[in-house]
Image: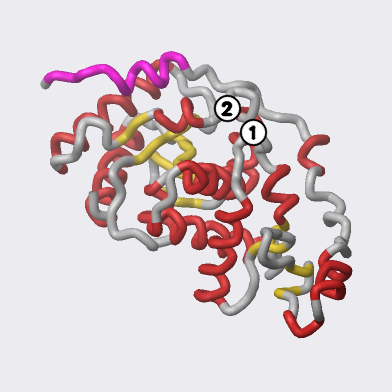
């Protein structure tokens, strides 16, 4: 689906919701972010959604009807809007992901009856890196660089550390090789580092930048061993209350139904 077609379909859904006096907030992830938010991809296969808050049966029914009417009107695939995202997020992370996504408030689309916000970008990056660790593709690496760039901007130009990436959603595994490739492409695009603290068998990096090989191996190891503690306050979210767990069973089921007109 091309971006302009998706926008028209979302506007159509928004109008249908607005006419019923409904405004729906949803969280989106995947290729839709690259296409609609970052504009780094011209197309997206689908929009994977997650409820930002519990929807009433009436709101679900109107949303369901609008999505299927938009599918027919604009010639979209049956699964152009789906709930795969809810199955991708570990149940232990779900409340936190929703909380962080709403707190982040990265608007993907907003109109009278519908608002889409991006999923927590740390989760999006970690999910992309886990996918790259299992099955590397150049396009996914480029998507990861775009996500990393946005996070670096949010953190006022500071690169993300290997430790921070590993500690964010720790059940998602990411290899050092992928982090090296990620930072290498990031440096190629932006001429500065995006990931700090990565180590492999060939080289070691200082927190301040790539080491100069002229220092010699002993000096290299000594300087690479110096680490600055992670900035305080990164995990202050633990002290904040989380929203109630959304009721998702009906929400996921309703988008798998086949509607015949």
Query: Where 47 falls versus 51 (above or below)?
Result: below
Q: Residue at x 52, y 23 (%)?
A: 54
Q: Residue at x 64, y 22 (%)?
A: 244
Would you name the residue on which mark 2 appears? 90
| Image spot of residue 13 (x, y percent) | 29, 38
Q: Quadrant of residue 4?
A: bottom left
Q: Quadrant of the C terminus?
A: top left
- The answer to whether the residue labelled 1 contacts the one labelled 2, judged by CB atoms less than 8 Å apart, is yes
| Image spot of residue 144 (x, y percent) | 50, 56
Residue 149 within the segment the image draws in magenta = no
Read off the magenta span.
Answer: 249-260
Secondary structure of the residue carrying tag 1 is loop
Q: Residue at x 48, y 43 (%)?
A: 131
Q: Front-most of 186 and 52?
A: 186
| Image spot of residue 189 (x, y percent) | 50, 75
Tag on residue 47?
A: none
Q: Front-most of 251 and 111?
A: 251
**Residue sitting at the far left:** 261
Would you name the residue on which mark 1 appears? 171
| Image spot of residue 167 (x, y percent) | 72, 43
Q: Quadrant of residue 9?
A: top left
Q: Front-most of 160 and 236?
A: 160
Secondary structure of the residue carrying tag 2 is loop
């Amino acid at each position: 689906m091309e971006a302009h077609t998706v926008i028209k379909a979302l506007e159509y859904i928004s109008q249908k919701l607005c006419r019923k006096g409904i405004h729906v907030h949803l969280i989106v992830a995947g290729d839709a972010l690259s296409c609609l938010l970052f504009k780094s991809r011209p197309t997206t296969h689908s929009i994977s959604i997650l409820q930002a808050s519990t929807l009433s049966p009436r709101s679900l029914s109107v949303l369901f009807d609008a999505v299927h009417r938009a599918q027919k009107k604009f010639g979209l695939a049956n699964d152009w809007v789906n709930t795969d995202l809810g199955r991708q997020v570990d149940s232990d992370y779900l409340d936190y992901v929703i909380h962080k996504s709403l707190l982040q408030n990265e608007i993907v689309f907003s109109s009278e009856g519908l608002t889409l916000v991006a999923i927590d970008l740390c989760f999006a990056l970690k999910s992309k890196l886990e996918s790259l660790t299992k099955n590397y593709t150049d396009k996914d690496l480029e998507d990861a660089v775009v996500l990393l760039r946005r996070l670096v901007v949010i953190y006022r130009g500071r690169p993300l550390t290997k430790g921070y990436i590993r500690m964010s959603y720790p059940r998602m595994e990411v290899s050092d090789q992928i982090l090296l490739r990620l930072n290498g492409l990031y440096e190629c695009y932006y001429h500065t580092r995006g990931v700090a603290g990565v180590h492999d068998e060939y080289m070691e990096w200082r927190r301040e930048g790539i080491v100069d090989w002229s220092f010699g191996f002993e000096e290299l190891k000594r300087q690479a061993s110096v680490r600055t503690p992670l900035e305080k306050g990164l995990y202050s979210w633990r002290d904040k209350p989380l929203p109630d767990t959304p009721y998702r069973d009906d929400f996921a089921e309703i988008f798998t139904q086949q509607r015949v007109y």
